[in-house]
Amino acid sequence: MADWAGYLGLMLDGALVTAKLTVLGCALALPAAFLAGLGRLSRHATVRAVSVAYIEFFRGTSIFVQLFWAYFVLPLMGVTLTPLQAGVLALGLNVGAYGAEVVRSAVQSIGREQHEACVALNLTRWQSLRHVLLPQAAVVMVPTFCNNAIELLKATSVVSLISLSDLTFQAQVVRSQTGSTALPFLTVLVIYFAYASLISAGMKALERRMTRGLDGLRT
Amino acid sequence: MTDAIIDIDRVTKRYGSHTVLQDLCFSVRPGEKLALIGPSGSGKTTILRTLMTLETIESGTIRIDGEHLFQMERNGSLVPADEAHLHRMRTRIGMVFQLFNLFPHKCVLDNVTLAPMLTKGVRKADAERRAMELLDLVGLADKARAMPAQLSGGQKQRVAIARALALQPRIMLFDEVTSALDPELVEEVLNVMRMLGSTTDMTMLLVTHEMSFAHDFADRVLFFDRGRIVEEGPPDVLFTNPTHERTQAFLKKIIAAGQRI
């Protein structure tokens, strides 16, 4: 029992790895989502095809398999990644594919009259997107991006399969060393929940900030 | 008709099997104020949308200042216009919509300055100074920092007019700009248009159901029905002494609905 402090330290190390994977994974997923989501709306058939291929591949195959590919198969092609890099790559590209559909549908949800105002004001397609459509679409994206970020957080537990000592992995270690099951798993539960709440709260604040003024309540 | 600023020649436009514009021909002189009236679905809004390049046409030609709108010359022959050509043609035309179409995420001032800064490279300070002049012109200088959602319909429409004017178009298209407004807000928008009509030499085309306004404002009135111009003439003649029975029937209905002409 004397080692509880040490075991807690192990769990916190795991929590740090999980946090790192989540933050870096999101940092990759976000640009991937925008690139592929806007790519699907492109005028150029090739860009659309590449985006669709990416989205369908990463949504249509298991994250386990994607992770194994990133870690075990890529080295056969001459690309060797650390477990963290492989984990971030698989998580980011996987969640990015879901995010791409969020970006696409949000941009498409902006009414035709906004497009028409852009044409009447002679803005180019890119200017319309950048200054008129995306700023409005971003507000629509935030709640779903919040879901995606929490999904990514929970999906990080698969990385223990490629020997990364994340939160779930460390809980298993503590369990096997102490024989106590409930306590480590309760700790894990609480930490995941705290992380998810943090993401939720952050996204809510972001949403409030972005919708300020749109409803006419600002004075 | 080389002196026409807008020349529309045998234009046909279809949505599927439904013909919206049927061999339409008319031209507009520079500075002319034209009112397009007629029942819903008669094609009058479609012609404005087509001039703004929001719609394409199946056949016929449209020229602005003698230059083809939907075609351009390449190696001596006419080919379909590319985006750069449309972009250049649109600089001459501005449009105000029935539902204002303001950008809800930008304040009034930014709504007005956005396009001049992006499409003409006007510096921010200059764009803002010009925007304030225009907002002053439409009586909304004190709302420059307000968000569109804080404005009444009439105020939104006046901002939309200022926004279109900021690009200094030679032709302005007004598409039922008072139809979505509460009755008590209609007059403030019409006043702005009256002022524009009397103080600028812009060519103005307006689609409207406000007959008495069309009567006072327009140099010429076109009566549309089923994609064609049935009758046209100066407002005094067309409103008081229409020759075509469909024009007579339409005006009778309007008067029965309680409008003054």
Image (cartoon, coloured by chain):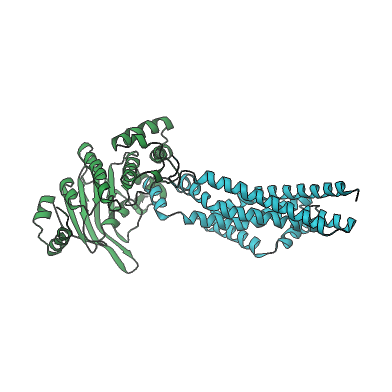
Chain colours: A cyan, B green
Q: In the drawing, does residue B79 fall left or right of residue B208? A: right
Q: Quadrant of the C terminus of chain A?
A: top left
The image shows residue B230 at horizontal and vertical percentages of 17, 61
Residue located farthest toward the right when viewing the structure as drawn:
A2
| Residue A217 location, quadrant | top left
Residue located farthest toward the front when viewing the structure as drawn:
A1
Q: In the drawing, does residue A195 fall left or right of residue B67? A: right
Query: Residue sitting at 58 percent across and 45 percent down?
Result: A205
| Residue B257 location, quadrant | bottom left
Nearer the observer, B161 or B53: B161
Query: Residue sitting at 25 percent across and 57 percent down?
Result: B44
Nearer the observer, A126 or A114: A114
Nearer the observer, A82 or B8: A82
The image shows residue B159 at horizontal and vertical percentages of 34, 42
Query: Residue sitting at 17 percent across and 55 percent down?
Result: B259
Query: Residue sitting at 29 percent across and 37 percent down?
Result: B139
| Residue A182 location, quadrant | bottom right
Residue located farthest toward the bottom when viewing the structure as drawn:
B17
Residue A80 visible in the displayed image = no
The image shows residue A162 at horizontal and vertical percentages of 80, 56
Number of marks drawn? 0
The image shows residue B127 at horizontal and vertical percentages of 39, 33
Residue A64 visible in the displayed image = yes
